[in-house]
Image (cartoon, grey):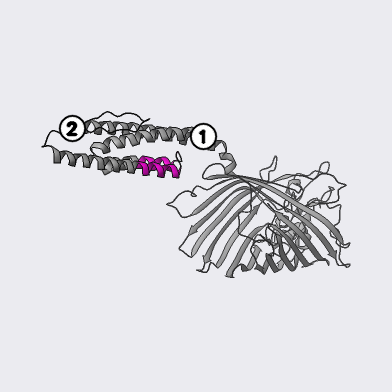
Amino acid sequence: MNLMKKRGKGRISLLILAGMLSAGLHPSAAHADSTEEIITLLKAKNIITADEAAQLLARHKNEVAQLVQQAQEQALAQAQSQPPAQPKPITIVVPKGQQYIPATSGPVSHDIKEEVSRQVKQEMKDEIAMEVQRENAASSDLDWSKRIRFGGDIRLRYEGDFFDQNNSSPVNVSNPTQVLNRTVDQNKFRYRMRVSATGEVDDQIEAGVRLSTGNTGTPVSTNDTLGNYMNKDNVLFDLAYLKWSPLSKSSAVVSNLDLWGGRIPNPFFSTDLVWAPDLNFEGVATNLEVPINSRWKGFVNAGVFPLQEISLATENKWFFGGQMGVQYTTPQKNSFKIATAYYDFQNTQGKQNPYVINNVGPYDYTVPLYQQQGNTVFNINAYNSGPTKFGLAADYHELNITGRADIHNFDPVTVSFLGDYVKNVGFDTATVNALTGENVPRQDTGYQFGAIVGNPTMQKLWDWQSSLFYKYLEADAVLDAFTDSDFHLGGTNAKGWILGGQLGLGKNVWLGARWYSTNVISGPTCSVDMLQVDINGRF
């Protein structure tokens, strides 16, 4: 850049010289403006500094003024001392050490000025273009670093599980040879670590990856429990997706459209009544927002997600989801949002094995890859000598209505109210009774309501938030595999209260605590209280 400044200064001298030539015989505002414009352009391109530009402009204007004054005085003197004669050329005397300029006539001087000015302008345009190319080439080498964003969080947790001594010990439906502990209190230390990278492939496509702790045995938790003889823990792909936003750069379209593919965040507006907070989806999805007017907007969310590919069978397990809703925002920025969703699970109902060979039956694939507790199940080997394997007795086609109100009148404190309702319209009593051989009561409904008061997010010291919720989730209201893993230690067929609070300890560091008090809705006694205390850090 220093070399360019030197070259620029040399060319400025030429411009000033051309200005002097023209000013000496035929000064005009157009000629002066041409030189001043080029000096201004050089300053704008950072080829010369602002001080240098000011000095050159002052010098140029002063020299032009002097030459004009000299020409006027000489012409007046000649007119007074001599009769009119043919115009004589004017010779400009250049100070010692500078180039000598021979006297020229007016037309020749004008031609010289125009030619020099044209050449200098072209050369400066070429030089500036080359400099822009060099700067673009240099910046492109670091362009990837500007297009990638990194982030993450870590959570350290103490968890205490406290049980009623009169509790029964249910069978673990995922492994029928084991029973679950519901009588001996437990104290656990856990942690969760997540690291993410998000990159802009181009103006419309985003790629995202997130690594986290956890294990492949559960899709609804990324916790690791300490106490495995100091052994190392797993790192898994929690997210891996491409997102295409084809309308993001269109000034003619006010709608927002996102198309997702891969392992993606939950695309639905929801609470933990239906979907666990740590659950991510695998498949394709779309989010569309359409403004109705300045206060109202509508939105549509939809997705197709494969749950299990079955070899040598045509009944792969799928999940299809669709949601529509509206949002209203007041002049005070208070917002009210409500949506209705339909979640359709295909081929998840179990089938009785007519026979088994070496403990393997033709319908073993109907057993879920993962289950928590609560759904109505039956032994698919009840009529043969095979080992106990539990399949789902009901179909799951869930109708979900979710609403939220955020009140910002107490800035920076926000007051939020949430409500959620779900009903499994796919539950068929006759089919369930036939598969289980029992008269199973219809338990296909769930709901949750509560409030959150405080800062929306924990960002600095003394930020705070408190919450209180009541949840009621019957046995077959939702598929228990994907609901919250903390409430009643995971699954359905539970009701109870959740009290929570958070307090900022510093920038992006905060303390969190939750108390769960839950009971079983139907069946043998099972009461579970849980305390969670977290220290969270975000980066």
Image quadrant where residue 62 sits: top left
Residue displayed at 64% across by 67% down? 418
Residue 17's mark? none
Q: Dot 2 lies on which element? A: loop
Circle 1 crowding by C-alpha within 10 Å: few under 14, some 14–19, many from 20:
few
Image coords of residue 327 (percent x, y): 53, 64
Q: Which residue is mark 1?
A: 137
Image quadrant where residue 83 sits: top left
Image: magenta residue range: 36-59
Q: Dot 1 lies on which element? A: helix
Residue 14 in the image: above or below residue 404? above
Circle 2 crowding by C-alpha within 10 Å: few under 14, some 14–19, many from 20:
few
User: What's the amino acid at mark 1?
Assistant: Ala
Number of labels in the image equals: 2
Q: Which residue occupies the extreme left position in the image?
A: 83
Residue displayed at 85% across by 59% down? 187
In the image, 503: left or right of 180?
left
User: What's the amino acid at mark 2?
Assistant: Lys
Q: Earlier in the sequence, mark 2 or mark 1?
A: 2
Image coords of residue 20 (percent x, y): 30, 36
User: What secondary structure is the magenta-colored segment mainly?
Assistant: helix
User: Disc 2 to disc 1, how far (Cα)?
Assistant: 55 Å
Magenta-drawn stretch contains 158? no
Front residue of this view, candidates 47 and 14 = 14
Q: Nearer the viewer, mark 2 or mark 1?
A: 2
In the image, 354: left or right of 416?
right
Q: Which residue is mark 2?
A: 88
